[in-house]
Image (tube, rainbow, N blue to C red):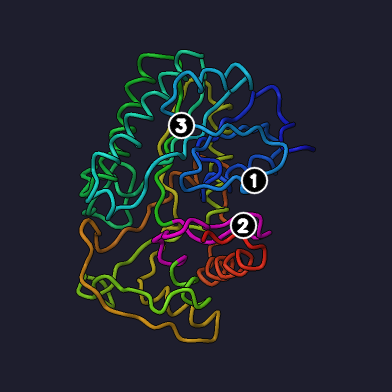
Amino acid sequence: MSPAAGNDAAGTILVTGGAGYIGSHAVLALIDAGRRVAVIDTLATGFRWAVPEGVPFYHGDVADGALIDRIHADQGVGAIMHFAGSLLVPESVAKPLRYYENNVVATRTLIESAVRNGIPRFIFSSTAAVYGTPAVVPVPEDAAKVPINPYGNSKRMTEIMLADVAAAHPLAYGILRYFNVAGADPQARSGQSTKGATHLIHVAAEAARGLRREVMVYGTDYDTPDGTGVRDYIHVSDLAAAHVAALDWLEAHPGESFIANCGYSRGFSVQEVLDAVDRVTNAKLTRTIAPRRPGDPATLVAATDRIRGLLDWTPRYDKLETIVGHALEWERQLDERGLRPA
């Protein structure tokens, strides 16, 4: 089956940011599931090579309502998976207006086009950052939403906007709140490739390849077992599979919406992650201690009862060493294929 072919009855799935890290894995998961796919991406942080041959590609911005309308008309869109946007917490603290423009204003245009064109389903990539510093860990979906940085605020604003729009129009949504996404496609078809990406496992994998002299450890005085921040790391391919399962659920429950965390209900500290990289590579990373970064909570671990009970989804790559191993292999592939950004 060609990438552009597939489940016609459900319509084409428009993947925004589909040339980026998570979006490209969602495209692969959709294709593997036999779905029709189209992609829009500005290529600001994504890569044209990450979109499989045969998938219709539109080089543009979701803030361009006329372009989105044209894509709906061209492709017969039946659902939107929205990954496009800005996602670095420290950058959001320094440049909040950019984040509100990219993550809220542009998304409003996208949602408005969905309503105008009668698109019935919308899946949104949200974040654990909407919880801020949670009072309860693991964090349930009904925990207080008190973001502590503009990134989290921008995602929470979009969640609220989707709920309000769904109450007024026939648009159902699935909101998936990601915890820490890592790893790469097990078949090495895609992975984290953006220059300057700050995800810990990606940074550690670059250091293991000799592309960085050290790995910075931001804060060793948190209230955690070893003083470093604890996060729930989810393999990007498991996350992509959750999006396909979310689409299946929305199709099976017309007019209904849901919100679910995406994680494994298990946390690892920064030092534990770096120890895992050392074990997989049989080498020792250089670690440099630095002060805490603004906007970083001590611990973020997902409660995942809802996603496991609601969706037909079971993680396949939930061992830390597996996540690290796939990330390391993708770093090798970037060099072998000459894909690493200059």
314 is higher (above) or lower (below) than 233: above
Contact check, label 1 and label 3, Cβ < 8 Å: no
- Residue with the mark numbered 2: 185
**Callout 3 secondary element:** loop
Residue type at mark 1: give it: Leu
**Callout 1 secondary element:** helix
Which of the two discs, 2 and 1, labels the residue nearer the N terminus? 1
Q: Distance between the Cα atoms at labels 1 and 3? A: 21 Å
Which of the two discs, 2 and 3, labels the residue nearer the N terminus? 3
Q: Distance between the Cα atoms at labels 2 and 1? A: 9 Å
Segment colored magenta: 181-202
* Magenta part, dominant SS: loop
Q: Distance between the Cα atoms at labels 2 and 3? A: 26 Å
Nearer to us: label 2 or label 3: 3
Q: Is residue 75 magenta?
A: no
Q: Position of residue 340 (x, y in %)?
A: 56, 61
- Residue with the mark numbered 1: 28
Contact check, label 2 and label 1, Cβ < 8 Å: yes
Side of 36 where 193 appears, left or right? left
Characterize the local packing of mark 3: few (<14), some (14-19) or many (20 or more) Cα atoms within 10 angstroms.
many
